Image (spheres, coloured by chain):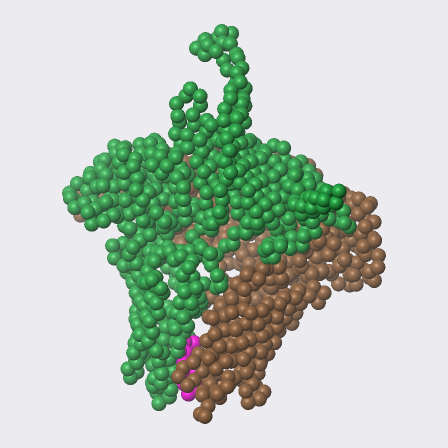
Amino acid sequence: MRIFITCLTLLLTITGFSQDYKFGKVSKEELQEAIHPIDSSASAAFLYKNRRTHFEYFPQDGFKAITEVHERIKIYNQEGFEYATKQILLYKSRNNEEEVNGLKAYTYNLIDGKIIEDKLDKKAVFNTEASKYRNEEKFTMPNIKNGCVIEYRYKIVSPFISNIDEYVFQEDIPIKKLEAIFEAPEYFVYKKNIKGYLNVTPQTERKNDKFIYHGVTNNDAITARDRERYTKEINFVTNKDAYELSDIPALKEEPYVNNIDNYRSGVKYELSYTQYPNSTVDYYSTTWEDVVKSIYDSSNFGGELDNTSYFKKDVEALIGSVSDPVKRAYLIFDYVKSRMTWNNYHSVYTNKGVKGAYKDHVGNVAEINLMLTSMLRYAGLRAYPVLVSTRSHGVPLFPTREGYNYVVSCVRFPEGDMLLDATSKYAMPNILPTKTLNWQGRMISEHGGSTLIDLYPSEKSKNNIFMMANLQEDGVLKGGYRSMKTNHNALDFRDSYIGVNLDDYLERLENSYDGMEISDYKVVNDLDLSKPVSESYKFVKESQADVIGDKIYFSPMFFLRSSENPFKLENRAYPVDFAYPSETNYKIIITIPEGYQIESVPEPVALMLPDDLGVFKYNILAQGKNVQLAVEAHVNQSVITPEYYAALKAYFSQLVEKQGEQIVLSKT
Amino acid sequence: MNLKYCVNICVLFTTLLVFGQENLYTSLTIPSGLKADANAVIRLNEVSIIIESETEMHIQGRRIITVMNSAGERHIGANVPYDPNTKIKDLKVSVFDARGNLIDKIKENDFKDVSAVEGGTLYSDSRVKYLEYTAIKYPYTIEFTYDVVDENTAFIKSFVPVNSYLLSAETCRYTITYPSDLNIKTKAKNFDGISLEKEEKPGEIHFEAKNIKAFKYEDFSPGLFDIAPMVLVRSTEFQLEGVQTKVENWNDFGKWMYHDLIKDTHDLPEATKNKIRELVKDEPNDRAKAKKIYEYVQNKTRYIGVQVGIGGWKPFNASEVDALGYGDCKGLTNYTLALLDAVGIKSNYTVVYAKSSQRNFEHDFASMQGNHAILNIPMEGEDVWLECTSQKLPFGFIGDFTDDRDVLVITSEGAQIKRTKKYTVEENLQTIKAQYEVLSDGGIQAQLKVVSKGIQYDDKYSLEVETQRELDKAYKERWSYINRLAIENIHIENNKTDIEFIEAISFQAGGYAKKIGDRMLLTLNAVNRNTYIPDRYRNRKWPLKVSRGFKDVDEIEIKLPEGYQIEAKPENILIENKFGSYKALLETKDEKTLVYKREFTIVDGEFPKEDYSAFRDFHKKVAQLDNSKIALIKTTP
């Protein structure tokens, strides 16, 4: 008997501690919890997050994907109130749309030791047609107070079985307990793609299932009367993946991350192929080769490459007399850039088609760059489309058709590859817009095969700055400034300079240096993309030195110095992404005021990042009335992994420090 | 004369002829004065308002606009909001190249049609149709024609020739026609230096304005609303969602709002009323009771925007807010009003233009104005203002969102224009008491206490709820001029009773003082440097307006490092001018301790444009003085 009691007590204790995740079983302990036990900074937390997606057979429409969602959220304080509003995105096409049903939602508050529940009123659920392709169902929970718990469940019925929403395993707030299930009938084969830093592996299982098929015999009969309806029970196997995770930390944003979602844990189910009994296999995608093939085979991609009739005459006139292949590539690239304007749409597929785009002078990314590729091929060059995922779209970690949203062109020369993107008017060969610099691209060969190619430029973007200045006794600095920029630095400059109102531009430039006065402003090679772009002006800038007693102190880099370390966080989990390697050189010649002599100058120094990731050199020479300063700063890699973060932070701190070091002048 | 020359002249002549006919579709005909500072030029904007009856208003328009560059795209204005009471009958766009050749036509079906839900809004029944067009080449010209019917006549489009910076206008016409039983009132503003023609005949008013040059935004200038020319238009008889009324003045307007939109919404359940009476029964006076109720509302509710029907003008019922625990500004204001009423405190629903740049209600023009609701409690001869959408603001504190402006206070007897609370220079006070010690390696170890009041409280109170990680970031931003800053300790106190925000912080900063040989250069002001210098304008156009003043008072005790003595130090300084004052003193407390005292004041006010550069110079001088250093030198042993 005694043993029995102990067992019972033990059992009770266990149940007492274990949470009940049944809908509606919100406990007092959950309501009493004042802060998250692990992450005290959390303003809210998912106590429970459950999603099950499976398929049901509907006699009229066939299989549909059913996604059941059940979430229980603890709201610790007002900053977490936003989690009391839920927005459900629903896709739609011309004749089909997803719908939500069975929505039930409650708010729980603990008042005077009693659990009080408030039900979400149906009237407070709003459905909005957000756009042609999307509906939104939105609701907000009643009586949200600090400490409350909300809970809701609903079902999404979707006719779009090839587009299963990603399972999100990590949120911006912590998740205490997560359960997720994906079940698909054997007819649909999905590929699962797991991403993020969490260790996630599902338990898999096969189980038997059945559905009632409503068929019609004699399908060829002309009148309905001649057809015979029948029903048949069909057995099939369901493949099930189940995930269970607990205490998932919140995902936190950091600066210089190309896209935080790349690191968010989750799983995406991508339809590989469908095979119904007694039918042939319909492929969607399985490997990168399949993905590429299915994109390539689409009439809005591969087909567009073969169409040459619409540009033939123009391109022949353009390159007729030119035989040098590199020159031909430049001519065609410039022609497409000047003829076409990008309509700001990303896609790997054409929309109205290359021909229509060519005629209208406007197109999306695929139209412009596939047209370019096609013209380059027509000119006898080995040109290939390259699939790219933009930074905001995330890194394509797994083979999916949605993995890529952008396409550029690559021409192969014996001397090397030339990457081209004609959507930007000032783009240069091998200088792709920063948004496309996202790991690797996938180059598609003539027959639909593919290889990975590096998108990050290997050549450094340079900025050479030359400044000659006279420092006056009152701290005013007068002089001339000239810069020469190449590659991405030049592209960024041209994007911000060309086409803007010059007065406006100058005013902004002056004010970016706290109202420095600028005159004789000149830009050279702004439109000649083959040369570095150069900017020069004369300036007058006040307060560039401290006059204390009979001494003058100043930093010889003056207003050009970086005064702030971009890396402020103590630790970092994700790589630092600079987008492209760079080199900045400063040559500064300073004449000191009459009646003063140079008393001391900073020491020359060279700082290095480990593994040749970067280097900073500072050389200074004082001679009579002149100081000559040469400073170089190199970042040799586009992406720097987090194990170098501490070194990087310290390096930038020293760099900022060194640039601030001062020269001392004393009265003669 | 040879033949070729003659042909050239002919061509020239024909071209001129075309110009003579004022071809507005080509950018070649833009008057040169309108090109300056303009990203787009309105060539012609014709708006025709036809009021058929109190329940039917047609808005028809034709807008020809030349877009000069990509920044001008946003002025095209080919977007039409609509809702269940507004029907779009026709939309059409034609596009012309720089020479005026038609290059594209776009019909209503090709407009994008989306829900017009703004941030913070859960639902709104407003939608918008807009044009999405990719320009091939600049400049180009768009002709946009539209025809819309509205069942409400409460909101009559004003005549606003240019509603944006960097936009100029060649010809703008506005015509309103109306049945003889309606009275149309108009009010023209900001037409100094711009001619406005008005023609009036029975049942029709016509306005025309020409050649309006582009405005450019300037720091510390009056808001666009106070400089852009416009004619406000209203009908004294109008209808809003089936409710018809006649409004001669603000008093009528207030009566109508009170009786038709607000009065019926104060339906609190008896249980709630009793609960509230119980809640405040021990409070000594009305002010304490009102404070208790405001805090009750802050704890119970949150802001959620829901805009349905009555043009978003009718508040939710108080009972509904009571049950749901949320509402928009109207619902929450009204709910607070109903709760106060339950304990016998009279308060008034108030309509305001909310934004940090103050905008006033028009005293002499009773039309639908404002974008936000707050609550007014007349109490012992003064007005207490409550922002009911905030869960955080102290009782009676409204901050820069609704301060110091004319608002419409609505009572059962009518309405009156009142001015909200102004935060004065002396009220917007920040005091810093700090000590820091300079170590012999140049590093400093600092402790400070910052107390902020008034608008300076408003600037900081949101820090209270930030996580340690965010706070660390926030202080590194505040002192971004200190390179190796390591925050050690942060203690924040939000004293809502006295409306003071108190920050106690300690930090260290390696290499703060720069060592140069035997010297050390120390910037005295480590914790409150003014680095802000207003933008410089080559030709300042607008008067200088400082909306809010402030005062900073700092006292910093500095311990000098062992083995160093002062070689040189800056002079004490006092600057006083009409924009404010600046004072910095350095006192010696003992051999090793200095006391740095600083006061910086900026007063609010309006000044002629000629004063702007002196105002800017003052800031520049302060930035320079805040960077003052002392030189220390090693003592010879």
Q: Position of residue B497 (x, y in %)?
A: 72, 65
**Which residue lies at the image location 56% right of the left edge and 36% below the top edge?**
A52
Q: Residue at x 78, y 53 (%)?
A: B340
Q: Which chain is tinted brown?
A: B
The residue segment tinted magenta is A543-554
Q: Quadrant of the C terminus of chain B?
A: bottom left
Q: Residue at x 29, y 51 (%)?
A: A430
Which residue is more in the foreground, A518 or A587? A587
Horizontally, residue A361 falls left or right of residue B559, namely left
Depth check, front residue: A668 or A569:
A569
Drawn side of residue B454 relative to residue A257, left or right? right
Height in image: B479 above or below A527?
A: below
- For this view, does B203 lie left or right of residue B74? right
Q: Residue furthest top?
A: A226
- Residue A552 sits inside the magenta stretch: yes
Chain A tint in image: green
Check the image and name the residue furthest to the bottom: B637
Q: Does residue A451 appear in the picture of this structure? A: yes
